[in-house]
Amino acid sequence: MKLVGRGLFKVEGEMPCSPRAIRVGKYSLIATLEKAEREEAAARILSFSLQLDQWVGVSWHRLVEMMQGDYELCQRAEKAQEHNFNERERIQRAMWKYYILSILTIGIYALFVAKPVAQMHEIPEIPFSGIFMFGPQHVFVGVQELVEREMLLQVRDGEDDVFFPTPALVSRIMQKQSVVA
């Protein structure tokens, strides 16, 4: 196996088309493999091929890192949403205090104190994924089902497994998406 990048290996053999010929959304291959688990697992694996514009296999460790990164992104988004919600309440209280003190001091308070400004956090965009509802088992089941259906080739590399897309998987996606080679 030829190493292409960290946890990525070049696919040996001929594939029916180039990676750019098929359409793969961010973790979704809508209505191509009958089950959301299989579609997300295939989309995650194929996303690396799309990024590199060559067919690559993905190590199990790299897939787990990808899911861990998505989970951490979701946690950051939830914290940012909570902060922004609490910040709105804080600003409302501070503005109320600012207006009351400005009225009581006939505007002198407003000359010396600036209006409160909200410190909002940017909310990162979270990809649509089943792991947020069902956990990482969602992808694990999908990978296992794709291996059983011979749409992914599982190869042992030391202590890690590497999953390669097969021509059967790519042909199935091409058929469902009406892509001509």
Image (spheres, grey):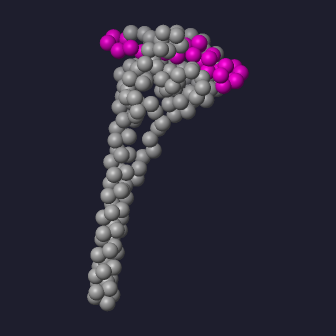
Q: Is 73 left or right of 32, judged from the image as shown?
A: left
Quarter occupied by the C terminus: top right
Picture residue at 28% right of the left edge, 82% below the top: 101
Check the image and name the residue furthest to the bottom: 106
Residue range highlighted in magenta: 157-181
Q: Nearer the viewer, residue 56 or 114?
A: 114
Quarter occupied by the N terminus: top left
Q: Is residue 174 magenta?
A: yes
With respect to residue 9, does 89 lie above or below? below
With respect to residue 118, does 162 lie above or below? above
Provide residue 26's location: percent of width, then percent of height.
52, 34
Q: Is 101 left or right of 26, judged from the image as shown?
A: left
Provide residue 155's location: percent of width, then percent of height.
43, 10
| Quarter of the view holding residue 18 | top right
Looking at the rendered structure, the number of numbered marks drawn on it comes to: 0
Picture residue at 71% right of the left edge, 21% below the top: 180
Q: Is residue 42 visible?
A: no
Q: Nearer the viewer, residue 21 or 115?
A: 115
With respect to residue 41, does 118 lie above or below? below
Q: Is residue 69 magenta?
A: no
Picture residue at 43% right of the left edge, 23% below the top: 139
Picture residue at 48% right of the left edge, 36% below the top: 128
